[in-house]
Image: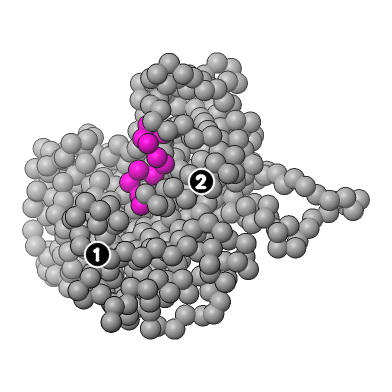
Amino acid sequence: MSGGPESNKVVIIGGGPGGYESALVAAQLGAEVTVVDTDGLGGSAVLTDCVPSKTLIATAELMTDVSGAAELGVNFHDHQGDAATTISVDLARVNTRVKQLAADQSADIARRLAKENVEVVQGYGRLDGPGRVVVGDQSIDADAILIATGAAPRTLPTAQPDGERILTWEQVYDLTEVPSELIVVGSGVTGAEFASAYLALGIPVTLVSSRDRVLPGEDADASHVLEEVSKRRGMKLLSESRMESVTRSGDVVTVTLTDGRSIQGSHCILALGSIPNTADMGLEEAGVILKDGGFVNVDRVSRTSARGVYAAGDCTGVLMLASVAAMQGRIAMWHFLGDTVHPLDLKKVSSNVFTAPEIATVGWTQQAVDSGEMNAEVVMLPLSGNPRAKMQGVRDGFVKLLCRPGTGIVVGGVVVGPRASELIHPVSIAVAESLTADQLAQAFTVYPSMSGSIAEAARRLHRV
């Protein structure tokens, strides 16, 4: 069951980032590769999650920019010369564009796999032992199998989506009418992103959070900024409010809380977490150990407990990011086919929450420092003092850097602000390559630029 010239038939179940990226690596290394896919190449990341949601958010960002244009001296007028004071969104047109972009991206992936001679089999794949995959009445022998089946939105018996007014995050792109009052249940990354996006699109939003703050898994200072900005823009935030049920009567959706309160709106998005797609796949019968909740247990080179069976992506529950899924898949193939491989290091993963403002993080966290898990010096620099930020009318956000007190090595960072997903990259490089704060500070930045704040934060960590 080890890689080699006589033993390199790879079967990948799932066509998302964990699946198609690993297929490309395996093909590059000379393996015979088959991808078994049910829902379309690209998986949820391309078809129902990352690509669609970030396309929707791109429209929301533009509306945010336009709404602040007057401060920068830009005024809009209608055809009669009167001041245009309102902007609105054509949600049907936005969602048509969203779905077209997702389909185009999926088609691009299909063309790339075909070019690399990767066979794609449509259907539901399940294991018949650790060395065979069954798809319908077709049986495919494999020297290595990669499980990359992703996850699906979690629902509750008391909160069942109907696809019309009670929606999972996969169903929002079928909306043609603009909600008159949107309720988002769940304040993790998905809930916060949709609440922020629809608010920017001019839709009244109520966010129901069972925790004491939005984004409980993110940096507390970042969550505080997001809450302040969201409230200022009109969002209703209900913290420490646990949902009991979601019901619909005609055009009205009612969210009932466990304390007896209820909120009514026209639509509700359920953002209650994810369930791994691992049921009825013959995994446990093949010797694959599943963790609580049905997630596949893997080590840092993506191996499961069954020899020759690997897993990658959301079905492992390691870190639910498309970038991590892709890296887990690549690592699996590098390991199986004998190429150079470095075990997955989650402390080098950069991630972003696409709210307004964005929240990007990498490495060790403030929470780890506060709890004593990591000894680090922390500096936080507001973006409001940055000259480029002033020019663009940006007042909210900050740069935070964490470095080791003895060596000065940068071990973590947080960026909150517009395009934080791009601004985190120099910090990510510093963390990945163990650069010191001085090295980060001494690299030239453009003046004026938002990235100047990263260099300035690093300078403030200098110790004589």
Give the residue drawn at x 58%, y 26%: 266
- Is residue 393 toward the left or the right of residue 149 in the image? right
Give the residue drawn at x 32%, y 42%: 151
Question: Where does residue 160 sit, x and y in percent of width and height?
Answer: 42, 24
Give amino acid for label 1: Ala
In the picture shown, does residue 176 fall above or below 325? Answer: above
Give the residue drawn at x 53%, y 69%: 386
Say if the magenta span includes residue 218. yes
Residue farthest along the front direction in this orientation: 464
Which of the marked residues, 1 or 2, is nearer the chain's N terminus?
Answer: 2
Residue 157 appears anywhere in the view: yes
Front residue (pair 213, 28) = 213
Front residue (pair 91, 456) = 456
Q: Identify the image quadrant of the N terminus.
A: bottom left
Q: Identify the image quadrant of the C terminus.
A: bottom left
Give amino acid for label 2: Glu
Question: Where does residue 240 sit, x and y in percent of width and height?
Answer: 38, 30
Say if the magenta span includes residue 52. no
- Is residue 304 toward the left or the right of residue 408 in the image? left
Q: Secondary structure at mark 2?
A: helix
Q: Disc 1 and disc 2: Cα gap in Å?
A: 27 Å
The colour scheme is: one colour
Give the residue drawn at x 17%, y 72%: 339
In the picture shown, does residue 454 fall above or below 133? Answer: below
* Residue marked by disc 1: 376
In the picture shown, does residue 427 fall above or below 353? Answer: below
Question: Where does residue 280 sit, x and y in percent of width and height?
Answer: 22, 34
Give, as a single range, the part of the protein colored magenta. 209-219
Q: Secondary structure at mark 1?
A: loop
- Is residue 293 toward the left or the right of residue 461 in the image? left
* Residue marked by disc 2: 228
Q: Residues within 10 Å of mark 2 (few under 14, many from 20)?
A: few
